[in-house]
Image (cartoon, helix red, strand yellow):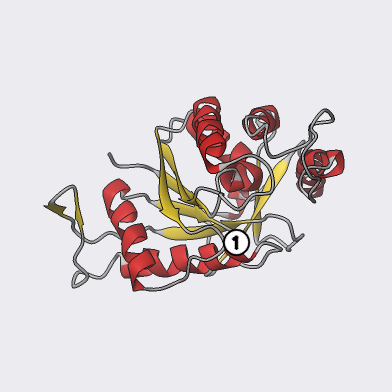
Amino acid sequence: MKLDILAFGAHPDDVELGCGATVAKEISLGKKVGIIDLTRGELGTRGSAEIRAIEAENSAKILGVVARENLGFADGFFVNDMEHQLKIIEMVRKYRPEIVLCNSIDDRHIDHGKGSKLVSDACYLSGLVKIQTSHQGEAQSQWRPKVVYHYIQWKNLKPDFVVDVSGFIDKKMESIKAYSSQFYDPNSKELETPITSKNFFDSVDYRARDLGRLIGVSHAEGFTVERLLGVNELGNII
C-alpha cells in the first residue's frame, strides 16, 4: 500500500501529541496516512504495553489512518544502528511515502531525539539501491521520501513552518484522550508524572492556539525541517 504520509513516533501517542491535527487535516483532504510506533512504551509510569497497544489502535481509528504498526524497539534503549535502520527502511519501502513526519530533533525524553535522527538517517539510506531489504519474503526496491519534517513536542522549539489546523484540534484532542492510561485523570491512583497533569493536557490546546495566533488563525502545529523550504509563489504563504 502506497501512502502519501508516514508518521513515526518513538512511543504510541507521540504522533497524536505532536502532529495529530495535521494528520487529521491531511486525511480530510484525501491523503493516505499511516503511523509507525518505534516502541511499545513499556517503560511508561502508568499503564502497560498491552494497554498502550489497545489505546493506539483506538486512536488510529479516531484519526482515520489506514495503517499503524509497532516495530517493538526497546523503550528507552533503542539505538541508531544498522539493525534498527534496516527495520525502518523496510517500512519506508513498504509504504513508499512522499512525506515522513517524525519526532522532535531535541526534546525532554531521550527517545525523541534518538528516534528523530534514526528515522531521518533511515529515510536517506532507504534511497540507496545497494542496500537490500525484503518484506514478507519479497525483495524491496529503493525509496526515499521527498521530505522529512520533525514535529515539535515538549520543548518549545522555534518552528520552521506551521500548519493551519483550525477545525481539527478537537479531533487531535479526542485521539489523545484515547490514551486514558497516560494523561490527566483526576480519579487515578497511579503515580503522577509531568504528562499526567491537567496543565500538560491543556497545554496541547493552548500551544496550538498560540501558534495559530501568530499566523492569524485559530490553531496551528509547528515543524522543523532539514533543508530549505521553497514555495511556488509568494501568494501561497499565509
Where residue 72 appears, x then y in whole percent?
A: 43, 52
Locate residue 68 relative to residue 220 in the image: left or right: left
Above or below: residue 105 compared with residue 174:
below
Q: Is residue 232 visible?
A: no
Above or below: residue 212 compared with residue 151:
above
Mark 1 burial class by Cα count in 10 Å: few <14, some 14-19, many 20+: many
Where residue 37 appears, x then y in whole percent?
A: 48, 48
| Front-lying residue, 100 or 176 | 176
Tag 1: amino acid? His
Figure disc tally: 1
Above or below: residue 228 compared with residue 8:
below
Locate residue 189 relative to residue 235 in the image: left or right: right
Above or below: residue 22 compared with residue 99:
above
Where residue 182 appears, x then y in whole percent?
A: 69, 39
Residue occupying the far front of the picture: 189
| Front-lying residue, 132 or 222 | 132
Residue occupying the far left of the picture: 138
Instruction: Please report the residue visible at 82 percent of the width from the left and 28 percent of the height from the top.
Output: 187
Residue corresponding to mark 1: 112
Q: Is residue 87 visible?
A: yes
Where residue 180 appears, x then y in whole percent?
A: 68, 31
Location of residue 47 (image quadrant): top right
| Front-lying residue, 46 or 209 | 46
Location of residue 63 (image quadrant): top right
> Which secondary structure lies at badge 1?
helix
In the rendered image, the quadrant that contains the N terminus is top left
